[in-house]
Image: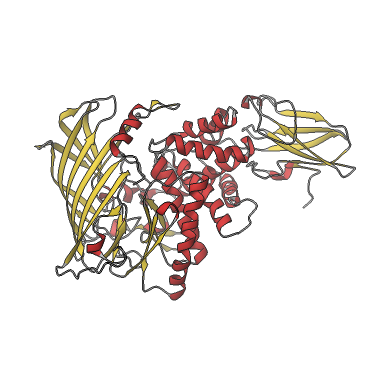
Amino acid sequence: MRLISSSVACLFCLFSIAAQNTSYWQQHVSYKMDIDMDIKSYQYKGKQTLTYTNNSPDVLNKVYYHLYFNAFQPGSEMDIRLQNIQDPDGRMVIKSGTEEKPVVISKISILKPDEIGFIKVNMLTQDGVAVKTKIDGTILEVKLNTPIQPGAKTVFEMNFLGQVPLHIRRAGRNNKEGVALSMAQWYPKLAEYDFEGWHANSYIGREFHGVWGDFDVTLHINKKYIVGGSGYLQNPNEIGYGYEDAGVKVKKHKGEKLTWHFIAPNVHDFTWAADPNFAHDVLVAENGVQLHFLYKNKMDKEYLKSWKKLQPKTAELLTYFNKHIGDYPYEQYSVIQGGDGGMEYAMCTLITGERTFRSLVGVVAHEMAHSWFQFVLATNESKHPWMDEGFTTYISSHAVNEILNEKKENPIAGSYKGYYNLLNYGIEEPLTTHADAYHYNLAYSVGSYSKGSIFLSQLEYVIGKENVEKTLKKYYAEFQFKHPTPNDIKRSAEKVSGISLDWYLNYWTQTKHTIDYAVSVKTSKTVVLERLGRMPMPIDVLLTYKDGSTEAFYIPLKMMRGAKPTTATVLDSWAWVAPTYEFTVTKEIHSVQIDPSGLMADKETGNNIYPRLVE
C-alpha cells in the first residue's frame, strides 16, 4: 500500500505545526464491525468494537455517536425542517395543490413503522464495563465510566440493530432506479472532537464531518447480492462477481449468505451498496489504482453504453486530479449506481445511473474530485461547505472541459450566473453560515457550489492562474488528513504568491459585500474608475486608443502588499478607503474595459465598459 500507516499518521498529525491553530492533532478511531443483513425485513444486526485514541490535550468525560438513520422517522428534526423551510428538497417531499396554494408533504412524515430508519443501541461498554447513555434523535450521548486522558486509548463494544429506511435522501432501500441498498451513514459513528470541541450536531440533511481511522467490516448478506463500497475486499476469490483474481475459478457457495470482508485504512467513513442485478467492471488506472464500476445490468441499452464509455474517462479524471491537486492515496475507487443524485464517500461514490454520457461524466468528475477535497483534506463540511463543494466544482469543471474537449473559455461560467441570480433574488447569506442554518436551500447551494468555486476562479484574477495552480498543490500537500480550515487555503495562497489575502477571505466568505466597479473618461487621456460595491478588488484595465493600439494596466489593491505576475503596466496601488481612482495616459482614448478576463465577479458588468454599450 502507498498509505501512511495509521500509527505514523496519528503521530504526524499530533505533532505537526501549522498556521491555523498552532497544532493539528487529530483523534483516531479503529472500527471492527460484523454485520448480518436481512434483505427481507431490511434490518441488520451489528457488533462493533471501536478503539478510540484521544490525541487531544483535553480530558474527555463524554463521547457522542451519530445515529443518522434515526432522522428518517416522523417527527424527527429532519422531518420538521422539511415541513418549515421555504424551499424543501424536491426529492424529500410530495408536492400537490396549485401554484397559488401549493401543498407540500414531507415524505418522512408519512413513513410507516416498517419503512422508517433506525439504529437501536442494545449494549454499549467502555473497557468491558457498561456505560450510561442517552439518545436524543440522531445523537447518542455516552457518559464515560473512566475519563479518557490525553494520549490514552479506550475500547467501546456495542451491539446494535438497524433498519434501512425507504430511500428519501442519500441512503436507504429501493431508490427510484431500483437499487436495493444504498448504505451510507448506516452505523453508529463516533462524532468528531477537534480544537473547536465536539461536533455532535443533529442530522438535518446536510453533509458530514468525521474522525480519521481504520475500518474492518465483515458483511453477511444474501449470496445473490453484489456489493461495492469503501475499502479493499479481503476475500475476493471466495466472493467472485468480478472481484476474483485472473484465472481463479470461484467455488459455488452452498449457504444462503456470502461473507464479504473489507478493510479501509485512514478514512473517516465507510459506505457500501448492494443489489442482485449489479454488473461489475474493473479498470486499472494510473498508479495501479483499481476503478470499479457497479451498475444495474437491466437498464436501457443507451444507459449501459454510457456506463461503458464512462470507464476510460474516469481513468482520465483520476490522472487529471493527480496532476492538478496531488496523488490519490488509496488503491481503489468505486463508481456505484445508488443514492439519489451524486454523493461522495470514502473511496467511492453513489450516483444515479440513468443518465446521458455527458451527465455521467459530469457527476463522476464532481463526486470523484471530492475524494481529494472531502476525503483526504476533509474540511468540516457542516461549517465550511464552500471549501469542499466549491473547490470540487472548480476543479471538476476544468477537468471535464479538458477531458471532453469542450473548449469553454470559462468552465465555471455557470457558477457566476448562479451567483448573480442569487444576488437578484436577495436571499444570499454569508458563507460562514452553518450548512444546516441557511434560510433557503437555494442560498446554501449557490453559496457553497457557485460562490465557493468563484473563490478559486476569482483568485486567479487576484494572484494569477499559475499561482492558483501552485496553491492547490501546496494546500493538498500540507493539509491532507488534517481537516483544514478557511485560513489554511488563504495561507497557502499567500505563501505561493507573496500577496496578503486576509481581505479577500473576509470580504468574499464572511460578508455579503458585492463587487461593482464603473469606468468613465474625464478627458480624452484621463481614465476614472469608481468603486460602487462594498468589496474592493485589484483592477485590470484594457485601453484601446484612437490610433487602434491597445495597452493593459494593472492597479493592485494597497492592502494586498504586492502584485500578481503580469505583462500589463503596473500603476500605483488603490487604497480601499478611496472611492475613485484616476490615471492619465499619453494617447487619446477610444474605449476602456475593466477586467477583460471576466473572472472578477462584478455584479453589474454594463458599467465596466466605456463608452457604454447601447441596448
Displayed quadrant of residue 31? top left
| Left/right of residue 365 with respect to residue 540 in the rendered view | left
**x%, y% of residue 354?**
43, 67
| Left/right of residue 470 with respect to residue 72 in the rendered view | right
Relative to 526, does residue 34 appear above or below in the rendering? Answer: below
**x%, y% of residue 106?**
34, 56
Relative to 559, does residue 130 appear above or below in the rendering? Answer: below
Residue ID at (54%, 43%): 451
Residue ID at (30%, 45%): 265
- Badge count: 0
Q: Is residue 430 visible?
A: no
Q: Is residue 229 visible?
A: yes
Residue ID at (64%, 43%): 599
Along the line of sight, the residue nearer the viewer: 178 or 277: 277
Q: How is the image coloured?
A: secondary structure
Residue ID at (20%, 46%): 32
Relative to 47, does residue 467 appear above or below in the rendering? Answer: above
Relative to 424, does residue 285 appear above or below in the rendering? Answer: below
**x%, y% of residue 374?**
41, 44
**x%, y% of residue 525?**
86, 33
Q: Residue furthest front?
A: 247
Along the line of sight, the residue nearer the viewer: 125 or 3: 3
| Left/right of residue 5 with respect to residue 420 in the rendered view | left
